[in-house]
Image (spheres, helix red, strand yellow):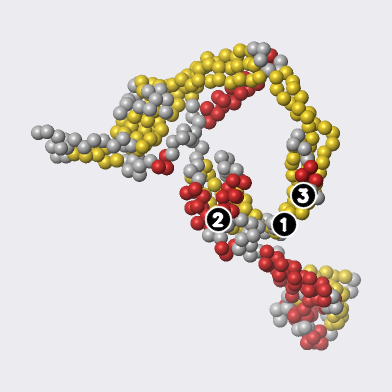
Amino acid sequence: MIEKVIGYFRGSLRIRISGFSPERFLNACMHRNIYIWNIQPVQDFYEMNISISDFRMLKPILKKTGVRAVIIKRYGFPFFLFQHRKRKVLFGGAVCAAGFIYLMSLFIWEIDITGNRRYTDEALEEFLADYKIRPGILISSVDCTDIATLLRKSHDRIIWVSVSVDGSTLNVRVRENEDSGDEGTDYAVMQQDGNDLVAERSGIIESMIVRKGIPLVKKGDTVEKGQILVSGAVPVVGDDGETIGYQYQKADADIRARTILEYEDTENVQYPEKVYYDFQQAEPYLQIGNLYLNSGKSDKISDQAEIYTLEKNFSLGEHFSIPVRIGSRIGRYYYIEQKKHTGKGLQKILSMNYQHFTETLGKKRVEIISNDVKIYTGRVCARAFGQLTVITDIAVPQPISIMEDNTDGDD
């Protein structure tokens, strides 16, 4: 591929040789390291390709071998320039286009965010915009390390960030903490000295693997919600066997317990359903950078309409986007009609919801031992409720309990 590009810019010729001894001509070219390719015999002569620089070296060879050479075709950029030498506007436009592309390549025109679930693209883009990280900034002003650190420190759920620049695209890859802990607990403000592990719910301990900390319960024990399972306060024992203090660390353990989960789900007999009209309203638009041009029709679209967008981004290659977008905002109108579920339909919906609930538990390493969930159908709504006996992880961290120092007690 690179050889073809270089050959195009150097230029080449298709020549036809004829005479008494074309074999002597070919041998002489080989002897003088003149590169000839695509040789084809045609009746009483030969046709071949040769570069412009090598063609200029043929005169003594042609004279010595008595062979005549005729140019039958010209290839490459030098001949293109010569053919269009009077078209100054064309070359001026090409130079301007090349300058424009180079200028656009100095800026970030797109921010691509992936891996986020809890935080939407719009929320993260607005957060970055507050720190002047938005489409249109110079690539030279982008510090990927600072952006990654900023996102991690400002969003508790983000545990890993990778930021890179590909062409004119700023790629932001994030990974969120998917643990479903109590959102009201801010583990970031825990004491840096350590933490305890407590029971998230009541149950009977089925298994324990303690890596750090002092276990306060054992397999088979019944524990209550909030009870300390593993303490991060490790006693320091003196030479006399007495506790002289405590060393605090982050307790770490896998503790699974048999416990009860309550389940409840309700579905109304009546439900609203969208019925769509046959017509739609479309509004084309053009966006160049931060300039947005449209006809203003979308402002007249009713509230009872679903709006979706079809958009095309212009780019040169895979990673070089330019700040030009065309698209159309389409409003699909509907009205609300009240309908009723049948008894079997309600049971099917509640059964599917319960199946989805159990599949979610399975992804969280929750083992279902037994269930007692039943469905009851009434005139107004249907209800599924009951209990599930499961084996699940119950240990969650909490700020460490500081132990009292009793080393100064009475003799």
- Residue drawn at (39%, 25%) of the image: 225
The one nearer the camera, 309 or 23, is 309
Q: Earlier in the sequence, mark 3 or mark 2?
A: 2
Q: CA distance from mark 2 to mark 1?
A: 21 Å
Foreground mark, 3 or 1, reads 1
Q: Nearer the viewer, residue 30 or 168?
A: 168
| Residue at image point 85% right, 70% down | 41
Identify which residue, 121 or 173, lies in the foreground: 121
- Where, quadrant-wise, is the N terminus in this rendering? bottom right
Q: Which of the 4 image quadrants contains residue 205?
A: top left
Q: Which residue is mark 1?
A: 291
Q: Secondary structure at mark 1?
A: strand
In this figure, what is the number of numbered marks?
3
Residue 84: quadrant of the picture: bottom right
Q: Amino acid at mark 1?
A: Leu
Q: Amino acid at mark 2?
A: Tyr
State the image coordinates of residue 266 (x, y, percent, origin top left): 61, 20
Disc 2 designates what residue? 131
What is the C-alpha distance between the residues marked 3 and 1? 14 Å
Residue pushed farthest left? 411
In front of the other: 364 or 277: 277
Q: In this image, 371 relative to 377: left or right? A: left
> Comparing marks 3 and 2, which lies closer to the viewer?
2
Q: Earlier in the sequence, mark 2 or mark 1?
A: 2
